[in-house]
């Protein structure tokens, strides 16, 4: 039985369409998955490298040594794969005290900060035993279901090839388990100040959500392709090649070129087409031209809005900075001091103790203003501000009054306060006795400080009062010496 040309065309179109549908779905699935895997591997390696770079290697080395010392001293060896073992909880209990260690807490908080602001599901550190092919957990940043330090997993077989050269870490690999599903994991080495590998920073990126979206995308793609196939078959039956195929090809080419331009550029692909069929194809083209113009207007509006938002954000940042800055000296003002004190009080509640407050009061400011003018008085204030900032370089400095300054002693300034106090007073003496200085440049100031005492101080205000009292005691001594 001979088939008509029309039927042959229908059969050919349907056969080709079905083949294209199947091919498109398979290729799309493979390509999307490969791109997704590649993106997750790159992201996992990048995040693991970032974590390794941000963690303090020397502190990480200390807590690692403590964990491994406890691990080596333990007679039990129960991996995380054997959580049903009745002795597993007993094994974990051996290491619980390490979670209260200062270095552990500091490293954990750093890891949590990275974890909370990134797309990483889990951030943790491991110590790898190449001979035993075991990875021992050191610090886990999880907020819930925290893995206790000292617990361990067996190294994935795919990572055995990296055990002979731990310097390169364990590049990202993808696993599929019943408990966690699809996960991309990467481990990068953490170095101490001497450049030695002390342990590894590890990150886990869950791929379950994106795989679900990929599956939904393939379902939707299949549905769209099926509908498109039906439409193509109907058009192939009703229209001849000249009236249908050519215009459709023109539209298809325009659509293909449309995606090749930058998204912030205007498009004219559909507007440049010359199709006058007098039917739905021409209507479709006109709709696409209208859509093209709408998109161009949207892009213009979006660019303008983005520029306005950027300008407004910059203005807000500038206003915020000015609100916390002393206009005369350029250092932070009383408002900034109050906010910093509130933050420090929160640190004290969380166990911080290494801080103090220094108070400085400029002498004879009123006399300088009355004798030489306020401009000279301002110069005296700025000169004192410079000396304070140059002396206490590791601590924030605030101007909290007309002639009063406060320093929140931290880090090296806290540890070396006596030497810095002597240096500060020495610089004041030099300024006061310098023969070339103008009278208002021969500044004098009273200095007093107090260090936080957890047994007697309830908050920073208690430290402030003691520092202020010590400063005024010094002021009285200076007055007595002048008499």
Image (tube, rainbow, N blue to C red):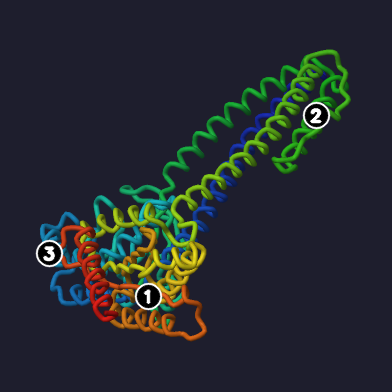
Q: Residue at x 33, y 76 (%)?
A: 412
Give how far apart the Cα atoms at labels 3 and 2 are: 78 Å
Q: Classify residue 369 as left or right of residue 237.
A: left
- Kindly report which numbered mark, 1 or 3, lies closer to the viewer in this rendering: 1
- Residue 22 is situated, as x and y percent measured from the top left of the image, at 61, 35
Q: Secondary structure at mark 2?
A: loop
Q: Are marks 1 and 3 in contact (CB under 8 Å)?
A: no
Quarter of the picture holding the C terminus: bottom left
- Kindly report which numbered mark, 3 or 2, lies closer to the viewer in this rendering: 3
Work out whether mark 3 precedes mark 2 in sequence or the reverse, and give the earlier one. Answer: 2
Whether residue 53 is visible to the viewer of this picture, yes or no, is: no
Q: Are marks 3 and 2 in contact (CB under 8 Å)?
A: no
Disc number placed over residue 456 in the picture, else none: 3
Judging by the rendered image, the residue that carries numbered circle 2 is 270
Judging by the rendered image, the residue that carries numbered circle 1 is 444
**Location of residue 260 with respect to 228 vertically, above or below:** below
Badge 2: residue crowd in 10 Å (few <14, some 14–19, many ≥20): many
Residue 129 vs residue 477, the one in the foreground: 477
**Location of residue 418 with respect to 461 vertically, above or below:** below
Q: Residue at x 74, y 42 (%)?
A: 260
Residue 247 picture quarter: top right
């Amino acid at each position: 039985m001979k088939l008509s040309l029309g039927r042959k065309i229908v059969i050919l179109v349907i056969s080709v369409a079905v083949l294209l549908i199947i091919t498109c779905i398979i290729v799309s699935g493979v390509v999307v998955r490969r791109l997704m895997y590649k993106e997750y591997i790159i992201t996992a390696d990048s995040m693991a490298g970032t974590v390794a770079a941000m963690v303090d290697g020397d502190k990480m080395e200390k807590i690692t040594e403590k964990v491994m010392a406890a691990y080596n001293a333990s007679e039990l060896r129960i991996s995380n794969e054997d959580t049903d073992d009745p002795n597993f909880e007993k094994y974990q209990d051996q290491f619980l005290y390490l979670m209260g260690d200062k270095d552990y807490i500091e490293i954990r908080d750093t890891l949590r900060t990275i974890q909370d602001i990134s797309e990483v599901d889990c951030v943790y550190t491991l110590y790898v035993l190449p001979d035993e092919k075991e990875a021992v957990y050191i610090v886990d940043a999880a907020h819930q279901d925290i893995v206790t330090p000292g617990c361990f997993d067996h190294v994935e077989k795919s990572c055995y090839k990296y055990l002979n050269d731990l310097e390169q870490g364990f590049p990202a690999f993808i696993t599929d388990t019943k408990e966690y599903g699809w996960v991309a994991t990467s481990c990068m080495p953490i170095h101490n100040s001497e450049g030695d590998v002390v342990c590894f920073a590890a990150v886990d990126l869950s791929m379950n959500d994106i795989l679900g979206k990929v599956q939904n995308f393939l379902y939707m793609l299949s549905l769209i392709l099926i509908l498109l196939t039906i439409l193509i078959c109907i058009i192939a039956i009703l229209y001849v090649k000249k009236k249908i195929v050519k215009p459709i090809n023109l539209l298809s080419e325009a659509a293909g070129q449309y995606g090749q331009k930058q998204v912030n550029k205007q498009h004219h692909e559909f507007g440049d087409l010359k199709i006058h069929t007098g039917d739905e194809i021409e209507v479709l083209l006109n709709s696409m031209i209208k859509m093209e113009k709408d998109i161009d207007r949207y892009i213009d509006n979006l660019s303008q809005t983005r520029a306005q938002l950027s300008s407004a954000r910059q203005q807000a940042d500038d206003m915020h900075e000015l609100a916390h800055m002393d206009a005369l000296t350029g250092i932070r003002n009383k408002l900034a001091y109050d906010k910093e004190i509130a933050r420090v009080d929160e640190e004290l509640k969380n166990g911080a103790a290494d801080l103090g407050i220094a108070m400085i009061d400029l002498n004879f400011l009123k006399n300088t203003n009355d004798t030489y003018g306020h401009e000279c008085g301002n110069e005296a204030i700025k000169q004192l501000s410079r000396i304070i900032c140059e002396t206490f370089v590791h601590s924030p400095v605030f101007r909290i009054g007309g002639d009063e300054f406060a320093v929140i002693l931290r880090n090296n300034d806290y540890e070396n306060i006596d030497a810095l106090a002597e240096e500060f007073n020495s610089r004041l003496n030099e300024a006061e006795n310098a023969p070339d200085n103008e009278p208002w440049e021969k500044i004098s100031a009273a200095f007093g400080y107090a260090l936080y005492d957890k047994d007697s101080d309830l908050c920073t205000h208690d430290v402030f009062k003691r520092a202020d009292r010590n400063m005024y005691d010094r002021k009285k001594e200076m007055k007595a010496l002048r008499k």
